[in-house]
Image: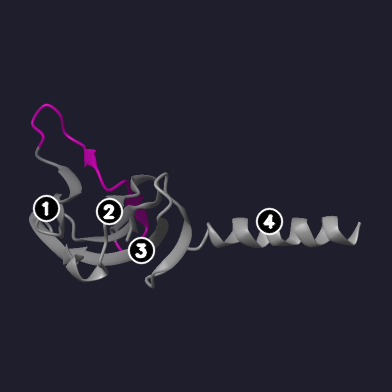
Amino acid sequence: MKDLITALTTRITTLESYLVYSADEKAVGTWIDGRTIYRRTLTKVVNSNSTGTIDVSGYGYYNIWINHGMSFNTYGGQYSSSSTQWVNNPPANNDYGLIYIQNTKLINIKNNSNNNRTYYITIEYTK
């Protein structure tokens, strides 16, 4: 019984480590090729109707992706939030936002709205 409790405790501790969101690099799992997956949540304020960038070239990654399910932005004094990719006024498409990573190792954050927004972008990567 003691071995079972120890095994369950270890498993719970491992699962809890996957739920960590931090500005610091955290190992959170293993990719399909056996490489360790690392996670960081980055913060960037982007003014209205402008584009911001975050340089990720120093992270030494092999593959990198944005975890859109765990990324969002806030606006209006932190009382409202939305996803990092949105279109609010189709068909004019004059109120939208998106984030993407270029081969230049920059995260580009397009904020085409009338509000300054604070972005919380969770990236995951392998080395």
Residue 125 position within the rendered picture, expressed as x and y whole percent measured from the top left: 33, 56
Mark linked to residue 103: 1
Assess whether mark 1 and mark 2 are in contact (beta carbons under 8 angstroms): no
Q: CA distance from mark 2 to mark 3?
A: 13 Å
| Kind of residue sitting beneath label 3 | Thr
Is tag 2's residue or tag 3's residue first in the polypeptide sequence? 3
Is tag 3's residue or tag 1's residue first in the polypeptide sequence? 3
Assess whether mark 3 and mark 4 are in contact (beta carbons under 8 angstroms): no
Which residue appears at 15% of the width and 52% of the height? 111
Residues shaded magenta: 77-93
Rendered-image quadrant of the N terminus: bottom right
Q: CA distance from mark 2 to mark 4?
A: 27 Å
Q: CA distance from mark 2 to mark 1?
A: 11 Å
- Most extreme residue toward the front is 34
| Kind of residue sitting beneath label 4 | Arg
| Kind of residue sitting beneath label 1 | Asn
Mark linked to residue 64: 2
